Image: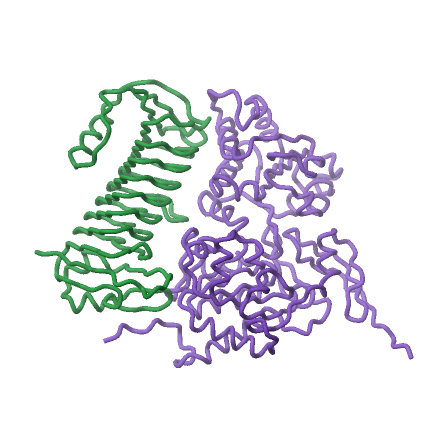
Chain colours: A green, B purple
Amino acid sequence: MGEIILTFKGMGGSTVPLEADPITPDLLQLKVRAEIERLPLYHGNEQLLLGDFFSVKGERSNQIRLRGDLSQVKNIGVGMQTGRIVIESSIGMHVGARMTGGEIQVHGNAGDWAGAEMTGGLLWINGSAGNRAGSAYRGSKYGMRGGVILIEGSGGHEVGGYMRRGLIVVRGNLEDHAGARMVAGSIFVFGRVGGRTGGGMKRGSIVCFNPLDVLPTFRLTSTYAPLFVTIYLRALRSRGFSVPEIGGGRFARYCGDLAESGKGEILVWQG
Amino acid sequence: MTVAKEMRVVKDVTCPFCGVTCDDLEVHVEDGKIRDVKNACVLGKDTFLHHLEGLATPRIDGKPASIEACIEAAADILARAKYPLIYGLDSTELHAHRKAIELADLIGANIDHTSSVCHAPSLQAVQTVGIPSCTVGEVKNRADLVIFWGANPAEAHPRHATRYSVTVKGMFTPQGRKDRTVIHIDVRRTPTSRMADTFIQIKPHSDYEVFSTLTALVNGHDLDVSEVGGVPLQEWRDLVEVMKGAKFGILYWGMGLTMTRGKYLNVVALLRLCQELNRFTKFLGAPLRGHGNVVGMAQVLTWQTGFPFAVNMSRGYPRFNPGEFSVADLLGRGEVDAALIIAADAIGNFPAKAAQHLKSIPLIAVDPKESETTKVAQVVIPAAQAAVAAEGVAYRMDHIPLPLKKVVDSPYPSDREILDRIIARVLAKRPDDGAKRAAPLPRG
């Protein structure tokens, strides 16, 4: 089975974002080229066709490759269940949001809400992610409920907010409120984190490899060498995601947030 | 020859200036002009006395035009737009809100209002954790502990203290001020500090930490730190005891929380504190809402679309996502291709980048007065000022609807009528004669 290559033709200078919800392997794998070209896309309040914005090569495949500058294109891979999407540039908001399975590779930066409320699958971003990656939509009780988000660059505010399960790994830095009000799940940050990390967290683990200002409502409970961190790092390396060698280092364990149930933890690498 | 002057006094007039929405004003009118206003604060008085100053004039591309022609030009712009924005709506009334939402639905627009740049984070926080709250009448009659946090009602809401929260005498607070403890917590002293028994100065951007600390202390935890927000922990322990010991506590917050680092999460932390305190006593929270009828727009938008602000209708149904469909972000990213600004000065208040984008697209301003927005708008439609020259309904900051009176006449139509006429012209321009706004079917 070959792959479907969608090359973005641009929007004729328009700055109105394009909403490309139908671009998921689940839908495209059943369709021939002419059908793919006639899938509806929303450009502002106008409904147009996929063929108006993309040239299509290939058909009936669950492997999709996207080319061209897609930073104004939203909703790629939303809710996808299977297959693979490779994006060869930066991508707009909501990439992989609510996905339940399959894999998305972004060879560039991703907009806000990347992998928001995802429940399964892998979202691998080579560049940076925006705000609220793996987080909840406004008004939702839970953010990410499963799956893995790997970010090689940095992330914005509230990454992993309201997270319920799953793993987020960030090689770069995060802004404020990482893991805000998270309920469970794991966040690894190899760069620096902003303020109020883990604010309002009920359970879950945030593992930091740089010093940080811990909120006053977290208490230092112990310093130890958790085995699970070693296992996670080994698993990441085996997938090809390079992480620094920490050589069995020790972590300070802060317990909180005591303003909530206080059963979450922030682990800070002590070298 | 002398002509007998028409003089009358309009009683029980509702003031449109701030969220206190005083409804006991007396306006003295002489020959269609307002001569005096009784009972109002200086802000409210100014609103009425200067209602004839700086009025806008109808024009297209800077040239004088009839209202009719302006409405036609506005409808032209909006009917053509792919991703329009309707914004403002704080200084107008309920029926204009309804018409604006109808228009947004019709043209598939983004609709947002002034909350988006003031108390929208409070609305988000309420969506996140809920709110224990009450009307100002409850505060007047029952509250024995009033805390103002990140707010300066002494200057922004001058009559809040005397009508509802500090000096007023109520059913269970018969001695007024003597029956209440008032605490002001802020990053600097303001006139509000002077009316408080206690002022606690905290470091800027430390509100979230302080709320979390107070909540942890209420929950009986001890903490490892000696100070939070630049204040010794013991002082926070004492405050918790005061809060727990109150019969009826209320925490009023302002934009010092919603527009600083942490934004809605500051308010989430505040509301969690209020909720936890209810295990010991009655303790409530309420935002001090500022500008005019901005609460009303959130109310109307919520009852009509299910969401309080940052609503997008481009797919024919409402979607809500602050950050994606909120005004500052839509403009900051330069996405919208036309804008209708009603009863608000967007360009005068927005960051330079957002204002710059507004200037680069077809812009329609509906406003009683000249503003930075009307100066650059392609189409300017002057309106009769709500609560002065047009009647309607406004919502007080505690979500109580109050009638707005028409005190004097205006040569211009009301916001409601202008929007209604724009809607009629947009409908007339579409071939299907206003059948439900539907995107064209896929071609081929």
Q: Residue furthest left?
A: A1
Residue B45 lies in quadrant: bottom right
Q: Is residue B20 left or right of residue A195?
A: right
Locate residue B261, reporting x and y percent: 49, 39
Seen in the picture, residue B2 relative to A222 is either above or below; the reply is: below
Name the one closer to the observer, A122 or A140.
Answer: A122
Locate residue A79, reporting x and y percent: 26, 53
Q: In which quarter of the image is the N terminus of chain A?
A: bottom left
Please name the residue shown 59% across and 60% down the image.
Answer: B372
Seen in the picture, residue B221 relative to A165 is either above or below; the reply is: above
Residue B344 lies in quadrant: bottom right
Q: Is residue A173 left or right of residue A25?
A: right
Name the one closer to the observer, A89 or B421.
Answer: A89
Q: Which residue lies furthest to the right in this view?
A: B1
Name the one closer to the observer, B356 or A138.
Answer: B356
Locate residue A121, reporting x and y percent: 21, 45
Please name the residue shown 25% across and 51% down the image.
Answer: A89
Q: In which quarter of the image is the C terminus of chain A?
A: top left
Please name the residue shown 50% across and 62% down the image.
Answer: B359
Q: Residue furthest top?
A: A223
Locate residue B185, reporting x and y percent: 61, 34
Task: Tell me how many marks there are.
Answer: 0
Seen in the picture, residue B109 relative to B197 is either above or below; the reply is: below
Seen in the picture, residue B167 relative to B369 is either above or below; the reply is: above
Residue A180: tell me if it is visible: no
Residue B342 lies in quadrant: bottom right
Residue B32: tell me if it is visible: yes
